[in-house]
Image (cartoon, rainbow, N blue to C red):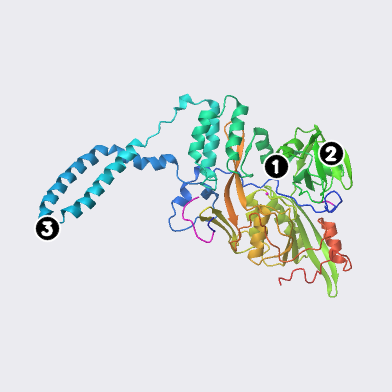
Amino acid sequence: MATCSRPLFVSASAASSASPSRACLRRLHTVAVVSIWEPSPPLRAAACCFAQTKHCCRRSTKCLASGPSVSRLTRPIKRLLSRYSSLMIAMHGNISRFYQAISALHQDGRSKHFMSVGFGRIVLGMVLVMSISSASYTAPSSSALTEENLLFLEAWRAVDRAYYDKSFNGQSWFRYRENALRNEPMNTREETYAAIKKMLSTLDDPFTRFLEPEKLKSLRSGTQGALTGVGLSIGYPMAINGSPSGFAVMTATPGGPAEKAGILPGDIILAIDDRSTEDMDIYDAAERLQGPEGSSVDLSICSGPSTRHVVLTRQTVTLNPVRSRMCEIPGAKGSSKIGYIKLTTFNQNAAESVREAIKTLRDNNVKSFVLDLRNNSGGLFPEGIQIAKIWMDKGVIVYICDSQGVRDIYEADGADTIAASEPLVVLVNKGTASASEILAGALKDNKRAVVYGEPTYGKGKIQSVFGLSDGSGLAVTVARYETPAHTDIDKVGVIPDQPLPASFPTDEDGFCSCLRDSTAPCNLNAAQLFAKS
C-alpha cells in the first residue's frame, strides 16, 4: 500500500448523566455506527483529476470518481480498427520498400541484422492490429437482460467506478460480473438483492454494504437531522471479562423516548422485539429501532447488574448534535471561564451548531474551549471538514488517498474561521470514529489543540452512498485518508497527547465538577489543561 506522501496525478461517522463504567461493561469499547461521505454523484465526475496532469486535485468531492469509462478507452481502438485497410495498404508499401533495401544492403553484409530487427517490427505491428481486431466481446444485448439483471449491473457499475481499491480484493471484477450473470439466480427482487450482497462480500470490506430501500431512507433521514425512532445511538461493545454481547448505547437523545425511559450510555441492548442482538448486524438493529411514529418496540436492556424490558413508543426525534455550557473555575487570580462543547454526531446541522455554541459562549466571556468528541461515531464527512475550518485558519485538514497515493487535499484557508486563536482541548476515546478522527487528527497535527483521552477507534476509510433505480442503495468505500502528518490511522486510531483519568465523566455537568474539585480522582488541573507540552 503506497503512502499519501507521493502525489497521484489522476482521479481517483450523550451521555446526559452516567458514564459507561458499570458492572455490565467494565471496559466498554464502541465502534462507529454510521460514517459516510455526504451523498454525492461521483460517478459523473471522472474528468476532474484526469484533466490535471501535474497538480493534485484539491478540495473537491468531484475527484472521488475513479478512472475513465470503458467507452472512453475503446474509442482509440475503434479508430484504429476503422483504419485497418489503410494500415494494411501502407504496410504493403513498406514491405516492398523493405525488400528493395535488402537488395541494396546485401553487398555490405548488413542485411541479416537489418532483417532481424526491421522485419520483427513489421510482424509485431501486424500482431498488434490482429490482436486488437480479434479481442472483441459480444455482450448480451440490453433486450436480453431482465430488469433484475439490470439492477445487478447498476450495482456492479457503481462499485466498479467508485471503489477505492482497484484490485477489488485481488479479483477480476469484470469476470465476477460475467460469472454472476450466468450463474446467480436473479428471478426475483430478493434473489437480486442476495446476488448483490454476495458480490459485495467478495471485497472483504465491512463498510461497503447493500442498503434495502428502507435502510437507505433511514440512513439519509438520520444524516439530515431528524428521524422517527427511539432516540438512541448504538455501537458494538467489546466483550471483555464475560460482559454480555449485543449493542452498546452510546448516546440517548435528550427528550427522546429512550432517555425518558431511563436508558443510559453504557447500557447494553440484548434483544429487540424478542430477537437476540448477539448475531444481529448493526444496520439491521438500527432499522429495527426506527419505524412509523406511534408504533412501539420492546427492548431487553442490561443496565448495571440487572436486565429489564422496556417498551418504547417511536416518535420523530430532532437530532441536535451539540450541547454546550460554560464552566467557571475559581482560581487564585479571579475566575477562569472554559467553554465546553459536546459534539455527538456529524449530521447536516453539526457545523452550524458548533458555530452557534462558540458565539454563545463568547458572549459569556469564555476565553478557552474544550471540544468533546468521545463516543462520536462520525457521520457526514463535509461537516467534519467545515468544523475543522471553524477552528483553523490555515493548514491541511486531511489527505484523501487511494491505493496509489494522494488524490485530494482538504485545507483551511481562513474563510470560515471564527476561533483560530483561543486555547483548545479535544477529548477522545475508543468510541471516537471516522469524521471525528479526521477532525481530531487535523487539530492535533496542526498543533491547534491538545488531545486528551485514549486512542480512537481507527476507521480510516470513507464511504459514499449511491442510490439505485429501485430505491435501494450502496454504501461504497471510496477512499482512505491520512492525517496532515501523513498518518494512516486505520485500525490504529489517533493517539492522544495526554491521558484522561479513568473516572473522567462523559457529560458536561460531570466535566465541570471534576475541574472545580481539586480533590476529586477525576480532577484535571485547569491551569495546565491547555498546556501543549
In front of the other: label 1 or label 2?
2
Spatial separation of the CA atoms under disc 1 and disc 3:
83 Å
Amino acid carrying label 1: it is Gly
Which residue is label 3 attached to? 108
Badge 2 or badge 3: first in the primary sequence: 3
Which residue is label 2 attached to? 300
Spatial separation of the CA atoms under disc 1 and disc 2:
23 Å
For residue 378, which numbered disc appears in the image? none
**Residue 387 shows in this picture:** no
Badge 1 or badge 2: first in the primary sequence: 1
Residue at 14% from the left image edge and 50% from the top image edge:
102
Q: Nearer the viewer, residue 58 or 152?
A: 152
Which residue is label 1 attached to? 222
Q: Quadrant of the C terminus?
A: bottom right
Magenta-colored span: 4-16
* Circles 2, 3 touching at the beta carbon (< 8 Å): no
Q: Magenta span has 14? A: yes
Q: Magenta span has 143? A: no
Residue at 85% from the left image edge and 58% from the top image edge:
510
Q: Main secondary structure of the magenta part?
A: loop
Spatial separation of the CA atoms under disc 2 and disc 3:
97 Å
Residue at 53% from the left image edge and 32% from the top image edge:
180
Q: Secondary structure at mark 3?
A: helix
